[in-house]
Image (tube, rainbow, N blue to C red):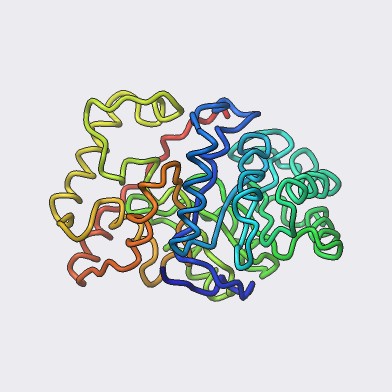
Amino acid sequence: MLYTTLGKTNLKVSRIGFGAWGIGGGAKNLKWEGMWKADDSTSKATLSKAYKNGINFYDTALEYGNGHSERLIKEVLNKNGIVIATKVPPKDMHWPAIDDDINNVFPKDYIIQKAKESYKNLGRTIDILQLHVWSDRWFDNDGWRDAFQVLRKEGIARFFGVSINDHNPDSAMKLVKSGEIDTIQVIYNIFDQSPRDKLFPLAKKKNVGIIARVPLDEGSLSGTFTYNTTFNDFRKDYFAKDRLKITVDKVNKIKDKLVNQKRATAQIALKFCLLDGGADVAIVGMRNPNRVEENVKSVDIEFTDEEIKFLESQRWIRNFYPEDV
């Protein structure tokens, strides 16, 4: 495993992180409740194997199984050197952010209350507390600043970040430019490279840590989908109608060009996120121990300049997520 310093936090984190949504069994208050059929014994084995293979960065959220994901992490990873990032859900339970008034989404007392719930679930100080959505329209309201100050003073959380709206990296530019945040989490993968346009250069200038989520495009960049793949979760809408065929064709183009005995499609996708100018850490969902070693080995992959240019040419910005969450 390779490690890096996550922005101005000075936290040493593994470049591959563990995305802990799946082990929570879904999100209690969303349309996706219970969509992941997670088995706790398998989840624990996966967490343990990730730790043994050098992964020390774990990204979770209070909303993942109503804290179940956080409690599993506490049970398995009560060890030194673990870096845990969790998230405060929006009070209006809407992803992405739509309300102009932050008092309806993240009022000060609500942020503090939910952070303390996560603190209890994790049984330790939260390394990075993130707001689970963000809008720069909220920037001038001091409630979130005051909440962060209280939580830092009380030892509930050390550093603070935001999870940026899906496929909308420019929605946090004002916040990042201010330098008042420690980390950002944003969708970034071979298809959606838009954060590299403005967000990443600014974040690096301000020494804000960059966490890439959805590095495998909801699984398509694992290279395992076919025209006949079916889904029993939100992806039945995400890849609805002709979307699955279009996506599989685009992934097959990458596979034909770059996959060989030494590198699988998922490894190529993860390593792309970590190239110069990209993210500090890529978080990937792992619900089975068998996936851990392959994901970890992705950091060792090397690309030629020609291959990097090819991957950059695969940029394909689109938003398949539903708008009615």
- Residue at horizontal 37%, vertical 26%? 231
- Residue at horizontal 23%, vertical 25%? 228
Q: Give the image location of residue 96, x and y in percent.
A: 58, 39
* Residue 49 shown left or right of residue 314 in the figure: right
Q: Give the image location of residue 102, x and y in percent.
A: 76, 45
Rendered-image quadrant of the C terminus: top right
Rendered-image quadrant of the N terminus: bottom left
Corner quadrant of residue 301? bottom left
- Residue at horizontal 66%, vertical 60%? 128
* Residue 77 shown left or right of residue 272 in the figure: right
Q: Is residue 113 above or below residue 261?
A: above
* Residue 178 shown left or right of residue 269 in the figure: right
Q: Is residue 255 above or below residue 4?
A: above
Q: Give the image location of residue 222, x and y in percent.
A: 30, 45
- Residue at horizontal 36%, vertical 56%? 293
Q: Give the image location of residue 163, x and y in percent.
A: 59, 51
How many badges with numbers are in the image? 0
Q: Nearer the viewer, residue 158 or 146?
A: 158
Q: Is residue 191 above or below residue 80?
A: above
* Residue 220 shown left or right of residue 131 in the figure: left
Q: Is residue 78 above or below residue 290?
A: below
Q: Nearer the viewer, residue 66 or 164?
A: 66
Corner quadrant of residue 70? top right
Corner quadrant of residue 103? top right
